[in-house]
Image (cartoon, helix red, strand yellow):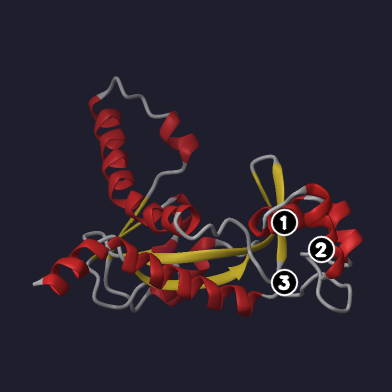
Amino acid sequence: MLRIHFLQEWFHLSDPAMEEALYDTPMFREFSGLDSTKNSSGECAPEMHQTKKGNQWHFGMKVHIGVDADSGLVLSVVGTAANVNDVTKASALVHGEESDVFADAGYQGVAKREETQNIEVNWHVAMRPGKRRALDKATPMGAVLDQLEHVKASIRAKVEHPFRVIKCQFGHVRVRYSGLTKNTAQLHTLFALSNLWMVRRTLLTEARG
């Protein structure tokens, strides 16, 4: 902690800026005796994993959430290592009272998985981007399919709002801990707070009434 304090003074950093610098600057972590991707034994946290997204490699975890299409509120949160396929957690994200579920292309094949066979819902999974780009929108069928994908995306967009809240309102842009359990617990709290944030006006109105 003393070394971190010295770094703050030397580089005129606030507490949030110091935290960012420790994540982003290997030299700062080395000087402070910290490594955000390793545990106390000096080994990478066994629950966290490396995965590639686009042309970039990321180390850490992934959070999967289920969101109510009407209210936009988060109903379920599941934390996994970053290399876990989204579709494997689909059954854990539904609560059993849905009639329709909208999901992105990462959930392709969800209806055929063993763990979803007892879930009676209509799955609406986005077409893979490459396949959608290949649609001939000049034909009636191509135009209809493209419009259907647009409708799916507009409904599915509700799932992005809670992520925006925890990033913009609560400043959560990186995991805080090296292990999966603590990070998942923190994310449960953050998404609960995001629900409160999104209904804050309704709650204030009811309190005044």
Q: 209 or 78, which lies in front?
A: 209
Which residue sits at x=61%, y=65%? Answer: 84
Instruction: Tell me the crowding category of disc 3: few under 14, some 14 to 19, or many 20 or more residues within 10 angstroms, Cα based.
Output: many
Q: Are marks 1 and 2 in contact (CB under 8 Å)?
A: yes
Q: Quadrant of residue 66?
A: bottom left
Find residue 50 and report its horizontal and vertical position in percent: 73, 59
Q: Which residue is mark 2?
A: 4
Of residues 75 and 144, which is closer to you in this image? 75
Q: Of the residues under marks 3 and 1, which one precedes in the sequence? A: 1
Residue 134 appears left or right of 186: left
| Image side of residue 164 versus residue 150, left or right | right
Q: Give the residue displayed 24% in from the left and 76% down from the top.
A: 97
Q: Which quadrant does the N terminus fall into?
A: bottom right
Looking at the rendered structure, which numbered label has been put on residue 18?
1
Indicate which disc residue 178 carries.
3
* C-alpha span from label 3 to label 1: 18 Å
**Cα–Cα span, label 2 and label 3:** 19 Å
Mark 1 is surrounded, within 10 Å at the Cα level, by few (under 14), some (14 to 19) or many (20 or more) other residues, namely some
Q: Nearer the viewer, residue 77 or 102?
A: 77
**Amino acid type indicated by mark 2:** Ile
Residue 33, horizontal then vertical, whole percent: 89, 67
- Specify the quadrant that holds the C terminus: bottom left
> Callout 3: helix, strand or loop?
loop
Q: Nearer the viewer, residue 17 or 46?
A: 17
Which element carries disc 1, helix, strand or loop?
A: helix
